[in-house]
């Protein structure tokens, strides 16, 4: 029933678009995610049943198992591990596209159907980009989780090896497209299938070579870019299979991922090419406790009781969340602090920088989990105009996104990067484990600002101490 199949694909494509549109706002993002998931379910079930790949009972069984795995991951993966899970999803999406394209090559050979040049090009794109996405995402996952050194990794001849891998993959793809029948068999595999395997191996190497030289500070951009890659690979696979729903969904993911990558690069005042070729920053080895002042500069240390008085009698407080808050799992106690200050008629807002954390929207997700009101989350461009009239800024685990060196030091690698201008506030309290630099590896000039006071310790413990002091006032 081709008409019914096309209608189902149209419904799924519409649900994708509606879901993506609702992801535009934190208030509707959860519903948008559910709508898009429903669209994917419609597309998958339609494909499996229309092509008689599985029986209805097998579809129900597979959906049940998949739903159980998804529910388990949703309930057990910590919010600090969310960037790694997103990287894994990107990788699995790329691997699926590459495997489907490879299976199509095998099917064409088995049925003795000649490969057309245009079909071969889409297969090449699916295998190449899909495999690059898979191995690149595995490396990104390793860097984000700490299993791989977060610092940029390079070795002599790496650029030359990268270019050779690209040339080899494109050469094998060109041979597949222009002369598939003349390709020799390898280990019992038909020539085109052997070429596809060779492309996959070179692409796997290429994915590693493209991501390992990128420093941890650029991981939000890498995650967004790999997300775009996975969409492009899926769209190409849709052309291979002549599947409308896959083409639409892949194009939406590819385009939205690329737009998000551009936003991330703009937020860091860097080009995508600079990110890919000139990654900086990485593991800082953030040990607990204050460190000695540098270059004769002094820092002011404070304690929870003093911060309690300062915030309780303030008119306006702005909280700047960062990755340190995520590591400490402090989002729920931060919400409790918000409620406590709000009851004292303190106007509390949260300043969100686009690249705070380890993935796009990381802070939004954390605060949403703690049920912080959406209207209290304010983007960088909007909150910067209010910081001059802010009594107290609480920087909880953020570092590079509030570093004034981005404005003041032309020699700094983050110079020109748009930041949250917290130095304009009347009082600045920095919650941090130590004086060590952030993920970009750059010392934070904010620590030495005369208006800044450092509250050292684990973010969750220090916020809990602050809450206890406020309750005692």
Image (cartoon, helix red, strand yellow):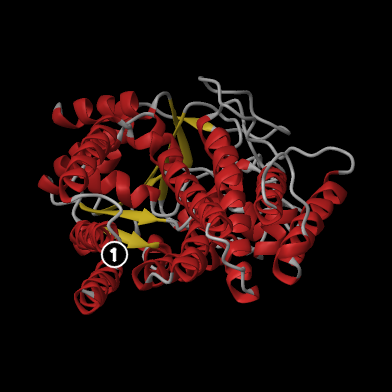
The quarter of the picture where the N terminus appears is bottom left
Tally of numbered discs: 1
- Residue 112 to residue 334: above or below: below
In this rendering, the answer to whether 203 lies above or below 188 is below
- Left or right of residue 437, residue 175 in this image: right
x and y percent of residue 251 in the render? 44, 71
Q: How crowded is mark 1: few (under 14 residues within 10 Å), some or many (20 or more)?
A: some
Give SS at disc 1: loop
Furthest-front residue in view?
Answer: 112
**Residue in the picture at 62% in, 32% down:** 283
Tell me where residue 266 sits by quadrant. Answer: bottom right
Name the residue beneath numbered marker 1. Answer: 23
Tell which of 458 and 179 is nearer to you: 179
The percent coordinates of residue 441 (x first, y second) are 66, 39
- Locate the C terminus by quadrant: top left
**323 shown above or below 159:** above
């Amino acid at each position: 029933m081709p008409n019914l199949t096309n209608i189902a694909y149209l419904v799924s494509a519409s649900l994708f678009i509606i879901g993506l549109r609702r992801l535009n706002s934190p208030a509707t993002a959860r519903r948008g995610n559910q709508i898009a998931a429903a669209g994917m379910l419609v597309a998958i079930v339609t494909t499996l049943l229309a092509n008689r790949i599985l029986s209805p009972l097998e579809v129900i069984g597979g959906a049940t198992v998949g739903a159980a795995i998804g529910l388990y991951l949703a309930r057990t993966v910590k919010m600090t591990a969310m960037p790694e899970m997103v990287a894994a999803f990107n990788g699995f999406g790329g691997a699926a596209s590459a495997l489907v394209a490879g299976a199509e090559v095998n099917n064409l050979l088995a049925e003795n159907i000649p490969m057309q040049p245009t079909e071969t090009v889409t297969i090449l794109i699916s295998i190449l980009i899909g495999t690059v996405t898979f191995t690149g995402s595995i490396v990104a996952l390793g860097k984000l989780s700490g299993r791989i050194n977060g610092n940029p990794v390079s070795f002599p001849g790496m650029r030359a090896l990268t270019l050779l891998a690209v040339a080899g993959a494109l050469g094998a793809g060109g041979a597949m497209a222009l002369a598939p029948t003349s390709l020799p068999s390898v280990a019992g595999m038909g020539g085109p299938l052997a070429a596809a395997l060779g492309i996959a191996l070179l692409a796997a190497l290429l994915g590693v070579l493209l991501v390992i030289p990128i420093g941890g500070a650029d991981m939000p951009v890498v995650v967004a870019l790999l997300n775009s890659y996975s969409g492009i690979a899926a769209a190409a696979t849709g052309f291979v299979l002549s599947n409308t729903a896959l083409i639409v969904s892949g194009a939406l993911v590819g385009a939205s991922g690329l737009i998000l990558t551009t936003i991330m690069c703009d937020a860091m005042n860097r080009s995508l090419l600079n990110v890919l070729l000139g990654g900086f920053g990485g593991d800082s080895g953030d040990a607990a406790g204050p460190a000695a002042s540098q270059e004769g500069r002094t820092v002011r240390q404070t304690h929870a009781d003093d911060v309690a008085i300062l915030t309780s009698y303030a008119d306006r407080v702005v909280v700047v969340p960062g990755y340190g808050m995520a590591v400490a799992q402090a989002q729920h106690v931060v919400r409790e602090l918000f409620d406590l200050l709000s009851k004292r008629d303190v106007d509390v807002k949260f300043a969100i920088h686009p690249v705070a954390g380890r993935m796009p929207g990381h802070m939004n997700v954390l605060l949403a989990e703690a049920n912080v009101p959406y209207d209290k989350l304010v983007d960088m461009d909007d909150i910067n105009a209010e910081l001059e009239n802010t009594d107290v800024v609480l920087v909880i685990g953020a570092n590079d996104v509030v570093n004034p060196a981005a404005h003041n030091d032309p020699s700094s690698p983050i110079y020109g990067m748009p930041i949250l201008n917290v130095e304009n506030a009347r009082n600045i309290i920095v919650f941090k484990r130590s004086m060590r630099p952030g993920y970009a590896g750059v010392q934070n000039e904010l620590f030495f600002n005369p208006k800044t006071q450092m509250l050292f310790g684990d973010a969750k413990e220090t916020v809990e101490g602050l809450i206890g002091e406020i309750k005692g006032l």
